[in-house]
Image (cartoon, rainbow, N blue to C red):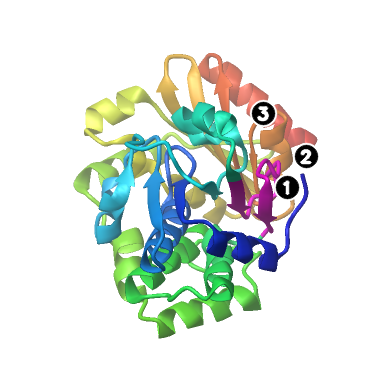
Amino acid sequence: MTNNSLTEITEQLNKIKSAVIFCHARPDGDALGAGLALTLALRNSGKSAVMCCEDTPPEKFGFLKAMQEVKRELSCTEFDAIICVDCADVARIGTFAEFYSKFAGVTINIDHHISNTCYGKLNYVHECPASCELLTEILISAGYEITEEIANLLMLGLITDSGNFVHCDVSEKTFNTAALLRARGADVNLINYNMYSRQPKQRAVLYGAVMNKMRFLLDDRLAVIVTTLEDLAKTGADKSLTEGFVDFPLTVEGVEVSVAMMEVKKRQYKISLRSKGKVNVNAVASSFGGGGHVLASGCMLLGELEEVIDKISYAVYQNL
Protein backbone atom coordinates (compact mmCIF):
# COMPACT_ATOMS: atom_id res chain seq x y z
CA MET A 1 0.00 0.00 0.00
CA THR A 2 1.18 3.54 -0.73
CA ASN A 3 0.28 7.04 0.31
CA ASN A 4 -2.74 8.79 -1.13
CA SER A 5 -3.05 12.46 -1.93
CA LEU A 6 -4.74 14.95 0.36
CA THR A 7 -7.49 15.32 -2.24
CA GLU A 8 -8.16 11.58 -2.30
CA ILE A 9 -8.42 11.46 1.49
CA THR A 10 -10.76 14.43 1.78
CA GLU A 11 -12.95 13.25 -1.10
CA GLN A 12 -13.40 9.93 0.67
CA LEU A 13 -14.19 11.62 3.98
CA ASN A 14 -16.87 13.66 2.29
CA LYS A 15 -18.40 10.56 0.67
CA ILE A 16 -18.88 8.48 3.81
CA LYS A 17 -21.95 8.81 6.00
CA SER A 18 -20.73 6.95 9.07
CA ALA A 19 -17.36 6.07 10.59
CA VAL A 20 -15.66 4.62 13.64
CA ILE A 21 -12.35 6.21 14.59
CA PHE A 22 -9.65 4.14 16.30
CA CYS A 23 -6.39 5.27 17.90
CA HIS A 24 -3.62 3.30 19.56
CA ALA A 25 -3.98 1.69 22.98
CA ARG A 26 -2.65 3.66 25.98
CA PRO A 27 -3.56 6.88 24.16
CA ASP A 28 -1.54 10.07 24.43
CA GLY A 29 -2.57 13.65 23.71
CA ASP A 30 -1.94 13.39 19.98
CA ALA A 31 -3.95 10.18 19.53
CA LEU A 32 -6.87 11.53 21.55
CA GLY A 33 -6.73 15.00 20.05
CA ALA A 34 -6.62 13.74 16.47
CA GLY A 35 -9.30 11.11 16.95
CA LEU A 36 -11.75 13.32 18.81
CA ALA A 37 -11.20 16.32 16.52
CA LEU A 38 -12.06 14.14 13.52
CA THR A 39 -15.04 12.61 15.33
CA LEU A 40 -16.54 16.01 16.17
CA ALA A 41 -15.80 17.42 12.70
CA LEU A 42 -17.59 14.52 11.02
CA ARG A 43 -20.58 14.87 13.34
CA ASN A 44 -20.76 18.61 12.78
CA SER A 45 -20.93 17.94 9.04
CA GLY A 46 -23.97 15.70 9.48
CA LYS A 47 -22.26 12.30 9.59
CA SER A 48 -22.38 9.59 12.24
CA ALA A 49 -19.05 9.11 14.02
CA VAL A 50 -17.77 7.46 17.18
CA MET A 51 -14.25 7.17 18.60
CA CYS A 52 -13.09 3.98 20.28
CA CYS A 53 -9.93 3.13 22.18
CA GLU A 54 -8.87 0.07 24.13
CA ASP A 55 -8.03 2.24 27.14
CA THR A 56 -9.83 5.07 28.90
CA PRO A 57 -8.14 8.48 28.42
CA PRO A 58 -5.81 9.31 31.33
CA GLU A 59 -7.37 11.56 33.95
CA LYS A 60 -5.06 14.47 33.13
CA PHE A 61 -6.84 14.97 29.79
CA GLY A 62 -10.20 15.35 31.51
CA PHE A 63 -10.04 19.15 31.39
CA LEU A 64 -11.32 18.81 27.81
CA LYS A 65 -14.97 17.73 27.86
CA ALA A 66 -14.69 15.81 24.59
CA MET A 67 -12.64 13.09 26.37
CA GLN A 68 -15.96 11.72 27.62
CA GLU A 69 -16.78 10.75 24.03
CA VAL A 70 -14.14 7.99 23.88
CA LYS A 71 -15.75 4.55 23.98
CA ARG A 72 -14.08 1.30 24.99
CA GLU A 73 -16.45 -0.93 23.05
CA LEU A 74 -18.56 -0.76 19.91
CA SER A 75 -22.33 -0.54 20.38
CA CYS A 76 -22.80 -0.74 16.61
CA THR A 77 -20.74 -2.54 13.98
CA GLU A 78 -22.30 -1.06 10.84
CA PHE A 79 -20.11 1.74 9.46
CA ASP A 80 -19.10 2.98 6.02
CA ALA A 81 -15.51 3.44 7.13
CA ILE A 82 -12.89 2.79 9.76
CA ILE A 83 -10.44 5.64 10.26
CA CYS A 84 -7.27 4.98 12.26
CA VAL A 85 -5.34 7.97 13.58
CA ASP A 86 -1.87 8.13 15.13
CA CYS A 87 -1.52 4.35 14.88
CA ALA A 88 1.53 2.86 13.15
CA ASP A 89 0.12 -0.63 12.64
CA VAL A 90 -3.10 -2.59 13.14
CA ALA A 91 -1.82 -4.43 16.21
CA ARG A 92 -1.61 -1.15 18.14
CA ILE A 93 -5.40 -0.79 17.91
CA GLY A 94 -5.46 -3.53 20.52
CA THR A 95 -8.82 -5.17 21.16
CA PHE A 96 -10.29 -3.67 17.97
CA ALA A 97 -7.67 -5.20 15.65
CA GLU A 98 -9.80 -8.25 14.89
CA PHE A 99 -12.81 -6.08 13.98
CA TYR A 100 -10.56 -4.04 11.71
CA SER A 101 -9.15 -7.11 9.96
CA LYS A 102 -12.64 -8.41 9.14
CA PHE A 103 -14.06 -5.05 8.04
CA ALA A 104 -15.03 -4.99 4.36
CA GLY A 105 -15.63 -1.24 4.00
CA VAL A 106 -13.33 1.71 3.48
CA THR A 107 -10.31 1.95 5.79
CA ILE A 108 -8.34 5.18 6.15
CA ASN A 109 -4.99 5.41 7.93
CA ILE A 110 -3.82 8.88 9.04
CA ASP A 111 -0.53 8.98 10.90
CA HIS A 112 2.83 10.71 11.36
CA HIS A 113 5.01 7.76 12.45
CA ILE A 114 7.92 6.83 10.19
CA SER A 115 7.31 3.16 11.05
CA ASN A 116 3.73 3.19 9.73
CA THR A 117 3.02 0.18 7.49
CA CYS A 118 0.39 1.95 5.32
CA TYR A 119 -2.14 -0.73 6.25
CA GLY A 120 -5.27 1.15 5.14
CA LYS A 121 -7.04 1.03 1.81
CA LEU A 122 -6.30 4.74 1.82
CA ASN A 123 -3.27 6.12 3.63
CA TYR A 124 -2.13 9.61 4.56
CA VAL A 125 1.16 9.05 6.34
CA HIS A 126 3.70 11.88 6.59
CA GLU A 127 6.42 12.30 9.17
CA CYS A 128 5.91 15.47 11.20
CA PRO A 129 5.70 16.40 14.90
CA ALA A 130 2.09 15.28 15.41
CA SER A 131 -0.86 13.57 13.75
CA CYS A 132 -2.86 16.64 14.77
CA GLU A 133 -0.79 18.66 12.29
CA LEU A 134 -2.00 16.34 9.52
CA LEU A 135 -5.59 16.35 10.82
CA THR A 136 -5.70 20.16 10.75
CA GLU A 137 -4.64 20.08 7.11
CA ILE A 138 -7.21 17.41 6.29
CA LEU A 139 -10.13 19.15 8.02
CA ILE A 140 -9.40 22.41 6.22
CA SER A 141 -9.08 20.65 2.87
CA ALA A 142 -12.35 18.78 3.45
CA GLY A 143 -14.14 22.02 4.21
CA TYR A 144 -14.99 21.10 7.81
CA GLU A 145 -15.38 23.85 10.38
CA ILE A 146 -12.69 23.99 13.05
CA THR A 147 -14.67 25.05 16.10
CA GLU A 148 -13.07 26.21 19.35
CA GLU A 149 -13.55 22.71 20.81
CA ILE A 150 -11.91 21.06 17.81
CA ALA A 151 -9.11 23.63 17.84
CA ASN A 152 -8.33 22.79 21.48
CA LEU A 153 -8.17 19.07 20.68
CA LEU A 154 -5.83 19.62 17.75
CA MET A 155 -3.65 22.01 19.75
CA LEU A 156 -3.45 19.42 22.54
CA GLY A 157 -1.86 16.93 20.14
CA LEU A 158 0.38 19.51 18.56
CA ILE A 159 1.74 20.75 21.90
CA THR A 160 2.22 17.37 23.56
CA ASP A 161 3.75 15.43 20.66
CA SER A 162 6.10 18.25 19.70
CA GLY A 163 7.37 18.53 23.29
CA ASN A 164 5.80 21.98 23.45
CA PHE A 165 7.41 22.89 20.11
CA VAL A 166 10.99 21.98 21.06
CA HIS A 167 11.57 18.77 19.06
CA CYS A 168 13.90 19.20 16.11
CA ASP A 169 11.26 18.10 13.59
CA VAL A 170 9.12 21.17 14.39
CA SER A 171 8.82 23.15 11.17
CA GLU A 172 7.44 26.41 9.89
CA LYS A 173 4.30 24.46 8.98
CA THR A 174 3.96 23.34 12.60
CA PHE A 175 3.95 26.92 13.84
CA ASN A 176 1.59 27.99 11.06
CA THR A 177 -0.77 25.20 12.13
CA ALA A 178 -0.55 26.34 15.74
CA ALA A 179 -1.27 29.94 14.69
CA LEU A 180 -4.33 28.83 12.74
CA LEU A 181 -5.65 26.82 15.71
CA ARG A 182 -5.02 29.74 18.06
CA ALA A 183 -7.02 31.95 15.70
CA ARG A 184 -9.86 29.40 15.91
CA GLY A 185 -9.91 29.73 19.69
CA ALA A 186 -7.43 27.14 21.00
CA ASP A 187 -6.51 27.99 24.62
CA VAL A 188 -2.73 27.49 24.72
CA ASN A 189 -2.47 28.57 28.36
CA LEU A 190 -5.12 26.05 29.48
CA ILE A 191 -3.45 23.20 27.63
CA ASN A 192 0.07 24.04 28.82
CA TYR A 193 -1.05 24.39 32.42
CA ASN A 194 -2.77 21.01 32.46
CA MET A 195 -0.01 19.23 30.56
CA TYR A 196 3.12 20.73 32.13
CA SER A 197 2.31 22.68 35.27
CA ARG A 198 -0.33 20.60 37.06
CA GLN A 199 0.36 17.23 38.61
CA PRO A 200 -1.02 15.19 41.52
CA LYS A 201 1.14 14.55 44.58
CA GLN A 202 1.48 10.86 43.61
CA ARG A 203 3.23 11.78 40.36
CA ALA A 204 5.66 14.11 42.11
CA VAL A 205 6.61 11.42 44.62
CA LEU A 206 6.92 8.76 41.90
CA TYR A 207 9.03 11.08 39.75
CA GLY A 208 11.52 11.55 42.57
CA ALA A 209 11.72 7.80 43.25
CA VAL A 210 12.26 6.90 39.60
CA MET A 211 14.83 9.59 38.83
CA ASN A 212 16.76 8.71 41.97
CA LYS A 213 17.50 5.31 40.38
CA MET A 214 18.63 6.68 36.99
CA ARG A 215 21.48 4.73 35.39
CA PHE A 216 24.10 5.99 32.97
CA LEU A 217 25.57 3.57 30.42
CA LEU A 218 27.73 3.62 27.28
CA ASP A 219 30.08 6.30 28.61
CA ASP A 220 27.10 8.32 29.85
CA ARG A 221 25.59 8.55 26.36
CA LEU A 222 22.63 6.39 27.44
CA ALA A 223 20.41 7.08 30.46
CA VAL A 224 17.92 4.49 31.70
CA ILE A 225 15.06 4.97 34.16
CA VAL A 226 12.79 2.20 35.43
CA THR A 227 9.32 2.40 36.93
CA THR A 228 8.45 -0.83 38.72
CA LEU A 229 5.10 -2.13 39.89
CA GLU A 230 6.46 -1.72 43.42
CA ASP A 231 7.12 1.98 42.75
CA LEU A 232 3.53 2.43 41.61
CA ALA A 233 2.15 0.56 44.61
CA LYS A 234 4.23 2.53 47.12
CA THR A 235 3.26 5.92 45.70
CA GLY A 236 -0.33 5.08 44.76
CA ALA A 237 0.33 6.41 41.27
CA ASP A 238 -1.29 5.20 38.07
CA LYS A 239 0.87 4.11 35.12
CA SER A 240 -0.47 7.00 33.04
CA LEU A 241 1.26 9.45 35.41
CA THR A 242 4.66 8.39 34.07
CA GLU A 243 4.09 10.17 30.76
CA GLY A 244 6.89 12.65 30.20
CA PHE A 245 9.35 10.91 32.53
CA VAL A 246 11.45 9.80 29.53
CA ASP A 247 12.22 13.39 28.56
CA PHE A 248 14.11 14.38 31.72
CA PRO A 249 17.26 12.24 31.23
CA LEU A 250 17.86 13.96 27.87
CA THR A 251 18.46 17.22 29.75
CA VAL A 252 21.66 15.70 31.18
CA GLU A 253 24.73 16.91 29.33
CA GLY A 254 26.31 14.15 27.27
CA VAL A 255 23.25 11.90 27.19
CA GLU A 256 22.23 11.08 23.61
CA VAL A 257 19.47 8.54 24.29
CA SER A 258 16.96 8.26 27.12
CA VAL A 259 15.18 4.99 27.83
CA ALA A 260 12.19 4.76 30.17
CA MET A 261 11.18 1.26 31.19
CA MET A 262 7.73 0.57 32.62
CA GLU A 263 7.10 -2.78 34.32
CA VAL A 264 3.75 -3.89 32.89
CA LYS A 265 3.77 -7.23 34.68
CA LYS A 266 6.41 -9.67 35.91
CA ARG A 267 9.13 -10.02 33.24
CA GLN A 268 7.40 -7.64 30.80
CA TYR A 269 8.50 -4.05 30.18
CA LYS A 270 7.11 -1.25 28.02
CA ILE A 271 10.06 0.66 26.58
CA SER A 272 10.01 4.33 25.57
CA LEU A 273 13.03 5.80 23.79
CA ARG A 274 14.02 9.40 23.08
CA SER A 275 17.02 10.74 21.16
CA LYS A 276 18.67 14.14 20.86
CA GLY A 277 19.24 13.45 17.17
CA LYS A 278 22.43 11.44 16.71
CA VAL A 279 20.74 8.08 17.29
CA ASN A 280 17.78 6.76 15.30
CA VAL A 281 15.69 5.22 18.09
CA ASN A 282 13.13 3.99 15.56
CA ALA A 283 15.84 1.58 14.37
CA VAL A 284 16.44 0.51 17.98
CA ALA A 285 12.74 -0.09 18.65
CA SER A 286 12.24 -1.81 15.30
CA SER A 287 14.84 -4.42 16.20
CA PHE A 288 12.44 -5.54 18.94
CA GLY A 289 9.26 -5.34 16.86
CA GLY A 290 8.36 -1.79 17.88
CA GLY A 291 8.73 1.54 16.12
CA GLY A 292 7.74 5.18 16.00
CA HIS A 293 9.96 8.10 15.02
CA VAL A 294 13.65 8.72 14.57
CA LEU A 295 13.63 10.78 17.78
CA ALA A 296 10.88 9.00 19.74
CA SER A 297 9.93 5.35 19.60
CA GLY A 298 8.78 2.45 21.71
CA CYS A 299 8.60 -1.31 22.01
CA MET A 300 7.80 -4.12 24.44
CA LEU A 301 10.43 -6.47 25.88
CA LEU A 302 10.22 -9.66 27.93
CA GLY A 303 12.79 -10.83 30.46
CA GLU A 304 14.32 -10.07 33.82
CA LEU A 305 15.15 -6.42 34.47
CA GLU A 306 18.92 -6.65 34.02
CA GLU A 307 18.49 -8.80 30.92
CA VAL A 308 16.18 -6.23 29.34
CA ILE A 309 18.54 -3.36 30.18
CA ASP A 310 21.39 -5.26 28.55
CA LYS A 311 19.33 -5.86 25.39
CA ILE A 312 18.35 -2.22 25.06
CA SER A 313 21.85 -0.99 25.86
CA TYR A 314 23.39 -3.20 23.16
CA ALA A 315 20.79 -2.14 20.59
CA VAL A 316 21.49 1.54 21.32
CA TYR A 317 25.25 0.85 21.13
CA GLN A 318 24.78 -0.66 17.65
CA ASN A 319 23.10 2.55 16.49
CA LEU A 320 25.44 5.10 18.09
The answer to if 1 sits in the magenta stretch is no
User: Residue 53 at x, y = what percent?
Assistant: 40, 40
Label 1 to label 3, Cα distance in Å?
Answer: 18 Å
Q: Earlier in the sequence, mark 2 or mark 3?
A: 3
Q: Earlier in the sequence, mark 1 or mark 3?
A: 1
Q: Tag 1's secondary structure?
A: loop
Location of the N terminus (image quadrant): top right
Q: Earlier in the sequence, mark 2 or mark 1?
A: 1
Q: Amino acid at mark 2?
A: Asn
Q: Amino acid at mark 1?
A: Val
Location of the C terminus (image quadrant): top right
Q: Read off the residue under disc 3.
A: 289
Label 2 to label 3, Cα distance in Å?
Answer: 16 Å
Q: Read off the residue under disc 2.
A: 319
Q: In the drawing, what numbered circle is on residue 254?
A: none
Can you see residue 187?
no
Q: Going 39% across and 55% down the picture, which residue do you hit?
A: 48
Looking at the image, do the residues carrying marks 1 and 3 touch, with CB atoms under 8 Å apart? no
Label 2 to label 1, Cα distance in Å?
Answer: 6 Å
Query: In the orientation shown, which residue stands out farthest toward the bottom?
Result: 183
Q: Going 62% across and 38% down the picture, which residue do you hit?
A: 89
Q: Read off the residue under disc 1.
A: 279
Can you see residue 242?
yes
Looking at the image, do the residues carrying marks 2 and 1 touch, with CB atoms under 8 Å apart? yes
User: Residue 169 at x, y = what percent?
Assistant: 66, 64
4 lies above or below 212: below
Q: Tag 2's secondary structure?
A: loop
| The magenta segment | 107-127
67 lies above or below 174: above
Q: Is residue 62 left or right of residue 296?
A: left
Q: Amino acid at mark 3?
A: Gly
Q: Nearer the viewer, residue 236 or 288?
A: 288
